[in-house]
Amino acid sequence: MLFHMSIAAADPRHVATVLAELIGGEAMPFPPVSQDGWMALADDGRGTSIEVYPAGTLLREAEGDADAYGEPGGLDRFTASHGAFGTALEMDEVMAIAHREGWPAKYRKRGDMFGVVELWIEGRQMMEILTPSMQAEYLATMTRAHWSAQLAAGAPL
């Protein structure tokens, strides 16, 4: 189970606010790593959250008995890091939010298995948003048995 993940954004507060809207939660300050950090905390009973740090923040290992810390660093436009999150919203509502924010978004089918809304936060950070019907597809296909069968059959994933 994924409890939380972090991403970087030019406007962490705004991005956390929009993500909170998508995952049915609230945006709140998250200062442990960065004084300008925010998080979208879902109201799902599991503490699911997305931490949003200022773009360019690097996580570093601390010496001895101390927590990791964040420090300013370089800024890459794109990253391989992404996540998939469920929403109670329908696709037209997700697309309306993306349009309102000016963020590219489109429906994609991943390997003929499950659909996602591919949402590009601030035009640079991909996040996959799954509506209730997409979540059902995901849960039906993303199992070890199904994945193994697809690999054995030589299916293009």
Image (cartoon, rainbow, N blue to C red):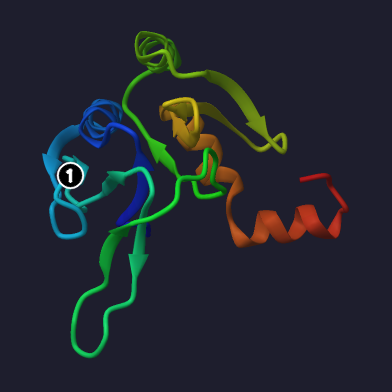
Residue sitting nearer the eye, 125 or 133: 125
Residue 119 image point, x, y percent = 48, 27
Residue pictured at 67% horizontal, 54% vertical: 146
Q: Residue furthest bottom?
A: 64
Name the quadrant containing residue 138: top right
- Give the quadrant of residue 86: top left
Residue closest to the eye, 36 or 50: 36
Q: Residue at x 69, y 56 (%)?
A: 147
Q: How many C-alpha atoms fall within 10 Å of the one at disc 1: few (<14), some, or many (≥20)?
A: some
**Helix, strand or loop at disc 1?**
loop
In the shown orientation, is residue 47 left or right of residue 129?
Answer: left
Viewer-side residue, 123 vs 47: 123
How many marks on residues? Answer: 1
Q: In the rendered view, would you say 42 is above or below 147?
A: above
Q: Is residue 40 left or right of residue 94?
A: left
Q: Amino acid at mark 1?
A: Asp
Quadrant where the N terminus sits is bottom left
Q: Is residue 14 left or right of residue 104?
A: left
- Which residue matches tag 1? 36
The residue drawn where x is 86% and y is 54% is 153
| Spot occupied by residue 128 in the image (x, y as percentages of width and height) | 49, 35
Quadrant location, the C terminus: top right
From the viewer's perspective, tell me whether residue 40 is left or right of residue 146. Answer: left
Taking the spot 44% from the left edge, 51% from the top edge, the residue there is: 74
Give residue 55's position: percent from left, percent from top.
36, 43
106 over 149 or under it: above or below = above
Q: Residue furthest right?
A: 154
